[in-house]
Amino acid sequence: MSFLIVLAALAFLMLAAYRGYSVILFAPVAALGAVLLTDPGAVAPVFSGIFMDKMVGFIKLYFPVFLLGAVFGKLIELSGFSEAIVVAAIKYIGRSRANAVIVLVCALLTYGGVSLFVVVFAVYPFAAELYKQSNIPKRLMPGAIALGAFSFTMDTLPGTPQIQNIIPTTFFKTTGWAAPSLGVIGSIATLAAGLAFLEWRRRSAMATGEGYDSATPATNVPVAPAGNAPVATTGAMPTAAAGVPAASAGTGATAGATVPVAARGNLPHPLLSVAPLVLVGVANFVLTKLIPGWYGDNYALTADALPGLHAPVTLTIKSVIGIWAVEGALLLGILLTIATAFGRIRVSFADGTKAAVGGALLAAMNTASEYGFGGVIAALPGFLSVSEALRSVPNPLVNAAVSVTALAGITGSASGGMSIALAAMSDQFIKAADAAHIPLEVMHRVVAMASGGMDTLPHNGAVITLLAVTGLTHRQSYRDIFGITVIKTLAVFFVIAVYYLTGLV
């Protein structure tokens, strides 16, 4: 019975997300409902002592990453830098390689710190124009955007500032650059297999005479409401530190409406446009190396330095290196963007940053609620059965990968599923890795990659948003997104195999 209670709580949360209800509201409902069925007298203590404690702890650690990432992405959009990068990629790579252009531009923006949702809004008008001029079926476009934005640059490529690569750092005491060799190998495998799949799909479709307009629906769905409110992603957990832009504050793109690339004049120089993205990557790497030297293993705040303190505050630096490095890098990227494009962003700065802050709050609270849910579920007797079942998978890396990708698929969220898994099973993962003499850097990379495996099932918030932006339906385009999902999931196990065969980290 206790096992069924846990399954019912997970199923309820998945159904709520899929039907468009707020995870912020229904994660505690699902968790406390399970407690009510297990021990009615423990509901209030569990809510205050476990759910809220976990939720607030998550916000304390990660909200600045969500906020800075959302603001940085919005400024890259408002400055015209994202448009300039896309136009330059089309010019130098060529219109005939439409899939490669879109994938590489999305990858550059995502790895540079721009949130996944902002990338979708910024790239879509150009992708639509490029596919139209190349007469490639429009229904294939979401697969290309998913490969570039939702896969290897989200959690595989070492150093990516996306939240999926940052969350494991606090559990495993690693940095965002964990297991660089495996991360690069996994990224190359995902990119190569993904591009081959997209090209096969393109050739197959065009061989039948299908063109750009063949799959375009007669009526298109508006992308966003007017004003500065974030787009509602049907309650499904956003998969990134995303400031979901409103149409009025973003590119102005709505599904089915594109602005010809040739009509976009007075864009910033491509090298200037890419400079903030490069700065974020370089600063992230440099700060990761420098922070331990500045602060040592531990840092204590005492009344000698801050007389108002009533008790010393001690920080374990190793657990926050990854977070501090990304925060510092994003802050530097924001400052450089403001300094080099102030004239462009000045008029829209207030409204744009309001939209970004709103999106950051929504994304952070969604993930924090799921993290609190995971903490409660882990405390229930029924979860012991789940843990025992997972322990039947003897290999520690495969165990972690299966656990994380399964929960990411159930919740429809990479960060949410990983948060639930790590809140409940991180100690188990660490003990198993230590016993097998597996570096925690490898565990970090496997867990991060697994979070972005089966997360993009039909109820995923990013998938729903992507299809709304492009004006397409699940029936038309989800097959290609699912193909990328399968490739990304298989890449996790490919990286595990590479580790055991070569010992590379």
Image: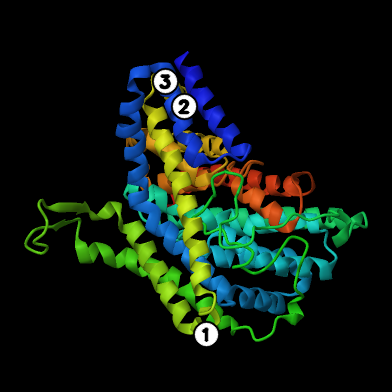
Residue 339 visible in the current orientation: yes
Residue drawn at point x = 44 percent, y = 73 percent: 333
Dots 3, 2 in contact, CB < 8 A: no
Using the numbered discs, state the Cα–Cα distance from disc 2 to disc 1 in whole angstroms.
55 Å
Label 3 or label 2, whichever lies nearer to me, is: 3
Local crowd at mark 2 within 10 Å, few (<14), some, or many (≥20)?
Answer: some
Instruction: Please tell me which residue is depicted at 64% across the width and 46% down the height of the picture.
Output: 485
Q: Residue at x 49, y 64 (%)?
A: 354
Q: Measured from the top left, where is residue 216 in percent x and y? A: 84, 56
Helix, strand or loop at disc 1? helix
Q: Which mark is residue 343?
A: 1
Kind of residue indicated by mark 2: Leu
Residue most extreme to the front? 227
Q: Tell me how far mark 1 sits from mark 3, CA to CA.
A: 56 Å
Q: Amino acid at mark 1?
A: Gly
The residue sitting at the left extreme is: 304
In the figure, residue 57 lies in which quadrant? top left
- Tell which circle, 1 or 3, labels the residue nearer the N-terminal end: 3
Name the kind of residue labelled 3 in the image.
Leu
Position of 413 relative to 26 (above/below): below
> Gap between marks 3 and 2, in whole Å?
25 Å
Residue 186 percent location from the top left of the image: 54, 53
Question: Dot 3, crowdedness within 10 Å: few (<14), some or many (≥20)?
Answer: some
Q: Which residue is mark 2?
A: 390
User: Given contact means CB atoms under 8 Å apart, are the residues at marks 2 and 1 in contact?
Assistant: no
Looking at the image, can residue 143 be seen? no
Left or right, 123 with reference to 42 = right
Task: State the mark number for residue 36.
Answer: 3
Judging from the image, what secondary structure is the residue with disc 2 in? helix
Reading the chain from its start, which is encountered first: label 2 or label 1? Answer: 1
Q: Position of residue 390 (x, y in %)?
A: 46, 27
